[in-house]
Image: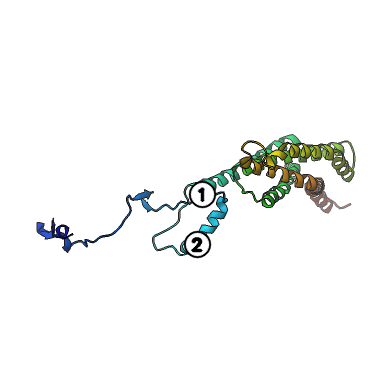
């Protein structure tokens, strides 16, 4: 230590001075290497979750006193699995939005209007409640497989709703009153809708029960599909006809307003 303090270094006007005059020399400890991320020093803390869901682990970390009062100049940045999960959820929202938009555009072309496709899409939110409830009851995390199950569920639910609305439109075109057409559609299309639900539930039951290879990863997907189909089947036969009635009345408003204006302009 004394030898280090006595080392001569260049000072002002090229005068050599002892090192101890410009530096403090003492024993200490520091990092073996300095890591940087985006030109900022980084300290990485890792932990083994041992099966704990990433969302719960993140909540526990955020609840620590040190995380609530970080020292000046220190900030948290998501990396690793947490960063991947954030990107996954962002991509899922974009994929779900694009899927719903494409379904709507295709239905507009099929039905030749912009209002009735909204009736079909009204069945989609009915399935999300059952999907999330299934995950909650079984204590499963909303991961990659569950997200895939939600995307799969949207297509199946939309198909069931199309069966219902299409029959009602064809019945009305045949001269049947709206209320009677909706009643007939719910009664005659209930069988194929229920059969689809039973078939999908039976086909995914063993995955939901954890039977088979890699069942732990695929179980959330099966639970999401089964829970969503059950709730959408029970509710769509009631909610979709009600939404159809509201949308159909809304479609008649421009014509009624035009006739009212013509009567005001040309009274009898």
Q: Considering the numbered disc 1 on the image, is that residue within a helix, a strand or a loop?
A: helix
Say which residue label 2 marks: 64
How far apart in space, not on screen, are marks 2 and 1 (Cα)? 17 Å
Residue 23, by quadrant, is bottom left
21 on left or right of 40: left
Q: Position of residue 27 (x, y in %)?
A: 25, 60
Establish if 40 lies above or below 94. below
Residue name at image x 39 percent, y 63 percent? 72
Q: Position of residue 207 (x, y in %)?
A: 68, 39
Give the class, few, some or many, for how many residues have Cα within 10 Å of label 1's Cα (few <14, many ≥20).
some
Q: Position of residue 169 (x, y in %)?
A: 82, 39
Give the class, few, some or many, for how many residues have Cα within 10 Å of label 2's Cα (few <14, many ≥20).
few
Residue name at image x 17 percent, y 62 percent? 20
Nearer to us in this view, 256 or 99: 99
**Circle nearer the viewer, 2 or 1:** 2
In the picture, the quarter occupied by the N terminus is bottom left
Q: Which circle marks residue 82 in the picture?
A: 1
Residue name at image x 51 percent, y 47 percent? 81
């Amino acid at each position: 230590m004394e030898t280090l303090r006595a080392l001569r270094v260049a000072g002002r006007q090229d005068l050599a001075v002892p090192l101890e005059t410009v530096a403090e020399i003492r024993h200490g400890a520091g990092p073996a290497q300095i890591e940087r991320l985006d030109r900022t020093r980084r300290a990485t803390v890792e932990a083994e979750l041992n099966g704990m869901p990433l969302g719960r682990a993140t909540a526990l970390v955020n609840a620590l006193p040190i995380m609530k009062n970080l020292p000046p100049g220190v900030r948290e940045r998501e990396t690793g699995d947490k960063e991947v999960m954030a990107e996954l959820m962002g991509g899922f929202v974009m994929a779900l939005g694009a899927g719903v938009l494409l379904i709507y555009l295709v239905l507009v072309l099929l039905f030749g209007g912009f209002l009735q496709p909204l009736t079909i899409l009204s069945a989609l939110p009915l399935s999300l409640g059952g999907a999330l409830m299934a995950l909650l009851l079984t204590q499963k995390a909303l991961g990659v497989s569950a997200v895939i199950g939600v995307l799969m569920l949207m297509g199946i639910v939309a198909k069931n709703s199309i069966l219902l609305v299409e029959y009602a439109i064809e019945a009305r075109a045949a001269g049947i009153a709206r209320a009677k057409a909706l009643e007939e559609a719910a009664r005659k299309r209930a069988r194929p809708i229920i059969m689809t639900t039973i078939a999908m539930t039976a086909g995914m039951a063993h995955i939901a029960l954890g039977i088979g290879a890699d069942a732990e990863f695929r179980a959330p997907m099966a639970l999401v599909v089964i829970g969503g189909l059950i709730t959408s089947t029970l509710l769509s036969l009631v909610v979709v006809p009600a939404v159809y009635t509201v949308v159909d009345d809304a479609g008649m408003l421009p014509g009624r307003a035009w006739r009212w204006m013509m009567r005001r302009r040309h009274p009898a």
